[in-house]
Image: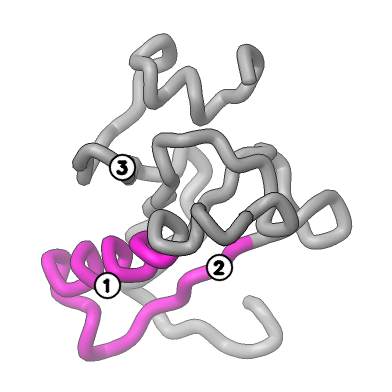
Amino acid sequence: MQDCLFCKIVKREIPADIVFEDDEVLAFNDINPQAPTHILVIPKRHIATLNDIEEPDQALVGKLPRVAARLAAERGFADAGYRVVMNCNDQGGQTVYHVHMHLMGGRRFTWPAG
């Protein structure tokens, strides 16, 4: 995954505004925010899409929403509400092929997305 943007961020080859890190997960502010808070939560290990998640990956990928909830609580909007989004492949809106969760908060969201 030499050309993966998020892998390069994990390896510190590309700078990012990191807001959380542990041995398995990295979270950083989105450079094109769609809300007052817009954080990307990623596994450090490369998994290209949701379709590529295998049984051994379940615990790692399951950690992403837990990290998102923690970050929402730390930023004070967990109780008011927030949105998490994971896109898969081109028609699903995925632009970086490394599994990631968008955490967005700090404003009211409507459905459909808007």
Q: Magenta stretch: residue 5 in it?
A: no
Between 25 and 109, the one lying in front of the other is 25
Is 14 placed above or below 110 here?
above
* Quarter of the view holding residue 20: top left
Dot 2 alpha-carbon crowd within 10 angstroms: few under 14, some 14 to 19, many 20 or more:
few
Q: Residue furthest right?
A: 91
- Tell me the SS state at disc 3: loop
On-image quarter of the C terminus: bottom right
Among numbered discs 1 and 3, the one appearing first in the sequence? 3
Considering only order in the chain, which callout, 1 or 2, is on the residue closer to the N terminus?
1
Disc 2 secondary structure class: strand
Q: Residues within 10 Å of mark 3 (few under 14, many from 20)?
A: few
Horizontal and vertical percent for residue 46?
54, 35
Q: Is residue 7 above or below residue 101?
A: above
Instruction: Choose top left, top right, bottom left or bottom right for residue 96.
Output: top right
Q: Which residue is mark 1?
A: 69
Frontmost residue, 15 versus 7: 7
Q: Is residue 68 above or below residue 93?
A: below
In the image, taking residue 54 as reference, residue 106 lies left or right, namely: left
Q: CA distance from mark 1 to mark 3?
A: 16 Å
**Residue hosting label 2:** 85
Numbered range of the magenta stretch = 62-86
Sooner in the amino-acid sequence: mark 2 or mark 3? 3
Q: Which residue is mark 3?
A: 24
| Marks 2 and 3, how far apart at CA | 20 Å
Which picture quadrant has residue 47? top right
